[in-house]
Amino acid sequence: MKLLEDKIIKEGKVLDGGILKVDGFLNHRLDCALIGELGADIAREFESAGATLIMTVESSGISIAYAAGEKLRLPVLVAKKHRSLNISDGVYTAPVFSFTHKVENTVVVSREYLTAGEKVLVVDDFLASGNAALGLLSLIEQAGATCVGFVAAIEKSEQGGRKLIEEKGVKVYSLARIKELRAGDIKFD
Amino acid sequence: MKLLEDKIIKEGKVLDGGILKVDGFLNHRLDCALIGELGADIAREFESAGATLIMTVESSGISIAYAAGEKLRLPVLVAKKHRSLNISDGVYTAPVFSFTHKVENTVVVSREYLTAGEKVLVVDDFLASGNAALGLLSLIEQAGATCVGFVAAIEKSEQGGRKLIEEKGVKVYSLARIKELRAGDIKFD
């Protein structure tokens, strides 16, 4: 999606360790007009996929998932992120290792809101190693629900996450797919 | 706002200790159509307030703030919530005690995105004791910016938060104002 690629080139910041900061428009400060366009694009791509629910994980994915949910007229389930496994009954949980923060989190959703038979479209801000994605897919499997697609606003394709998700039989769709990431030189697939 | 009051009566759950759970439509599972209406209502109320920026705090306020930001064509700044004060330079911070989780958090925004002269409309999901609100107002003061209003989707009026904010000269607007909260008996102001 050219709009997002242009924004990344113009305002994204490349930090040491191949970290792309998009704090100015996607994470910390939200460019609502841009995010609305991301939601519309996701809705166009998945309008015939038969999704019944959108799922994301707090907190950077929420606005994008909401924008898609509004357009597709679907509810959005926000998986919570916890530092511990000390969690109440009535939930599905999966471990997720964050390479950015070097910490293992647990993602959690209530069994009440993720039920067998749901067709879930997962929407997140980033796809890199695929660790967070696999955690969310695990929650969907545990519930006996189906994943009809995985959307990332930004994919860092050389980190291999796409392959792990596709091996599960899930379609991956990213709005900007970064092949190479160096300060002053960002290349897209 | 009758739409939200009806939803609270129909689907809200009252837990011990006067906690209102709205997980089914506002926090964990998002009713995008409802949240879009909340955003539209906030936009109508503040369309002439001259706001240049909306601010919220992760993660339950994000979708409501985004919905308002989209309607008002304003960016949304999402304050981060941390467990510690061990935070990098270049930020404003303020302590916030969470009565729900019995823990002191720190709210954080980047100085780059909250600058002197901004007119900030704060949007959050709940207003109870006003602790979180005062933390956000402190960030705005530190930046030399102005707060043009504080919006809560749900206010628990007997907990007194409104008074603390109004004492700072800030207008408070809530979409559902709960006077009494008992299981099976929720009264609105």
Image (cartoon, coloured by chain):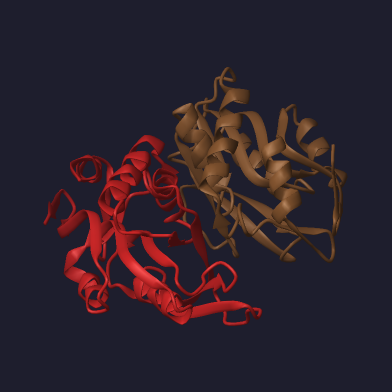
Chain colours: A red, B brown
In front of the other: B166 or A184: B166
Quadrant including the C terminus of chain A = bottom left
Residue visible at 57% across and 79% down in the picture: A84
Say which quarter of the image contains residue A131. Answer: bottom left
Instruction: Work out whether B101 lies above or below A38.
Output: below
Task: Give the percent coordinates (x, y) of residue A136.
Answer: 41, 72
Residue visible at 42% across and 56% down in the picture: A61
Task: Give the percent coordinates (x, y) of residue A118.
Answer: 45, 68
Is residue B142 visible in the rendered image? The answer is no
Say which quarter of the image contains residue B158. Answer: top right
Is residue A9 visible in the rendered image? The answer is yes
Q: Of all residues shown, which one is farthest toward the top? A: B48
* Number of marks drawn: 0
Instruction: Work out whether B47 lies above or below A50.
Output: above
Task: Give the percent coordinates (x, y) of residue A22.
Answer: 33, 49
Q: Is residue B7 left or right of residue A103?
A: right
Q: Is residue B165 left or right of residue A187?
A: right
Instruction: Work out whether A23 lies above or below A149.
Output: above
Task: Give the percent coordinates (x, y) of residue B70.
Answer: 45, 34
Residue visible at 63% across and 44% down in the picture: B124
In front of the other: B156 or B33: B33
Q: Is residue A89 left or right of residue A142?
A: right
Residue visible at 72% across and 56% down in the picture: B12
